[in-house]
Amino acid sequence: MFDALQNADSIELVHVQQSCGWRGVFIVGPQQPHGYPCHRGTTFQLGSNEDSLWTQGNLPAAAGGKDYYKEGKGIPEPLLLVRHAGLGSIDDLCRETLALTKMDWNNDGPYDRLPVTLNFAGTLATIVKRMQKLQPQSYPVRLFM
């Protein structure tokens, strides 16, 4: 990858893992769990280049200050973010990833679990796989959304 992009000023290489085994419960008092999961956007740093980020969770801002969990029930599992190359703080990486989970304008939900870039790549791969022959030309992005 670095050989192919040697003229790029900087390369950000991040591994996003969906299943990491962690769960997030919001505790309001001594051994007293809250009725809703941890807040969306909660992070837990595991190392200098590794962080867990809850992209699902309680989102009071979406319900005018009242507790709101889009999934309804269950305990959300975070995404595990591992930076293999790039500069900047791990907090910036988490903020950017969280922002990308709010960018899918094709649904009415306040967020998705995965960043829109990963959802878009999966959709594109599914469509291209079903095409009998892909012509060597440019295709409008709107055809794949």
Image: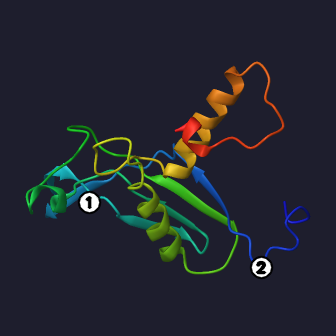
Res 2 → quadrant: bottom right
Q: Which residue is mark 2?
A: 9
Q: Is residue 144 above or below residue 69?
A: above
Instruction: Say whether residue 115 is left or right of residue 12.
Output: left
Secondary structure at badge 1 equals loop
Instruction: Say whether residue 19 is left or right of residue 75.
Output: right
**Residue at image coords 60%, 81%:** 88
Tell me the amino acid under the disc marked 2. Answer: Asp
Q: Which mark is residue 13?
A: none
Mark 1 nearby-residue class (10 Å; few <14, some 14–19, many ≥20): many
Instruction: Say whether residue 100 is left or right of residue 111.
Output: right
Q: Which x, y percent locates residue 133?
A: 80, 23
Return the residue found at the far right.
3
**Residue at image coords 47%, 60%:** 52
Q: Is residue 108 above or below residue 131?
A: below
Q: Which residue is mark 1?
A: 39
Q: Which x, y percent locates residue 64?
A: 9, 61
Tell me the amino acid under the disc marked 1. Answer: His
The N terminus, quarter of image: bottom right
In-front residue for pair 36/11: 11
In-front residue for pair 12/107: 107
Q: Earlier in the sequence, mark 2 or mark 1?
A: 2
Mark 2 nearby-residue class (10 Å; few <14, some 14–19, many ≥20): few
For the rendered model, the colour scheme is: rainbow
**Residue at image coords 47%, 48%:** 114
Q: Which x, y percent locates residue 27?
A: 19, 60
Q: Which x, y percent locates residue 32?
A: 13, 56
In-front residue for pair 105/80: 105
Secondary structure at badge 2 equals loop
